Image: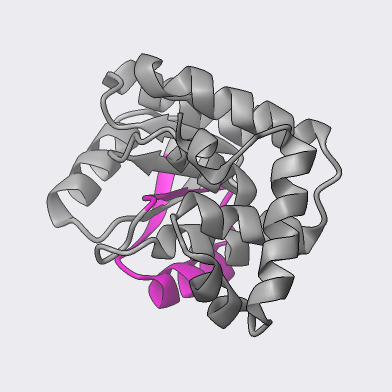
Amino acid sequence: MVKIVIVEDHPIVRLGLATVLGAHEDLSVVAEATDSGAALAAVADTSPDLVILPLRLGGVRDGLELCREIKSVERGPRVMMYTSYTSHSDATLAFLSGADSFLTKDHPEGRLVETVRATARGSRVWNVTADTGVSARSLEERVQRTTLTAREQEVLGFMLQRYTNSEIAKELFVGVPTVKTHVSNVLQKLGIDSRRALFG
């Protein structure tokens, strides 16, 4: 039996997910949450095998931060990002946040259940729409092949969210020149000429 926590702030989507997954004898939705605090409490209380998260909670990218927090828990659950956002950098942001799998909501129900089971078994499944998948997978592969430091991965995450150098500096409490150095190192290691090239 796969124990699942669903995190979703849209009540209809949450009900739909619970209904679809609950129809299968090998899947059990043990808790539902609408925000990060409730999600972390549910994970602590139920010790699930899998957490399903949206990319955005409350209209912001809180799903990514929540994913990082859940994945930092020792022997914590696997995380599947389930989202309607399909810009080609979204899958890469999820990857950098530690997500085990990524599925866009335009896939049919069978793909959802199949991805849930595969992720719970330990597989990494990256199902993205055809028009965004190639560039996202290409960037993910480059990240996996490089030796980006933890800070450089963090900077890349902000770059993919289109933060300016000054905005990244404020987030990381460092100077703009330091950020420029990190940005330069990231682009060089990824073999990318400019920030614009990140977005295809």
Residues drawn in magenta: 28-55
**Location of residue 39 in the rendering, given as x and y in whole percent from the top left corner:** 44, 67
Assess whether residue 37 is covered by the magenta stretch: yes
Q: Is residue 79 above or below residue 134?
A: below
Q: Is residue 126 above or below residue 169?
A: above
Q: Is residue 78 left or right of residue 167?
A: right
Q: Which residue lies furthest to the bottom in this view?
A: 173
> 168 and 82: which one is in front?
168
Q: Which residue is drawn at 76% across and 41% down?
A: 188
When asked about the image quadrant of residue 70, the answer is bottom right
**Location of residue 159 in the rendering, given as x and y in whole percent from the top left corner:** 54, 54
**Location of residue 135 in the rendering, given as x and y in whole percent from the top left corner:** 51, 23
Q: Residue at x 70, y 73 (%)?
A: 177
**Location of residue 51 in the rendering, given as x and y in whole percent from the top left corner:** 49, 51
Q: Which residue lies furthest to the right in this view?
A: 147
Q: In this view, does 63 lie to the left or right of 2?
A: left
Q: Residue furthest left?
A: 12
Q: How is the image coloured?
A: one colour
Q: Quadrant of the N terminus?
A: top right
> 166 and 13: which one is in front?
166
* Residue 47, visible in the rendered structure: yes
* Residue 76, visible in the rendered structure: no
> 183 and 158: which one is in front?
183
Q: Residue at x 38, y 40 (%)?
A: 82
Q: Residue at x 66, y 34 (%)?
A: 192
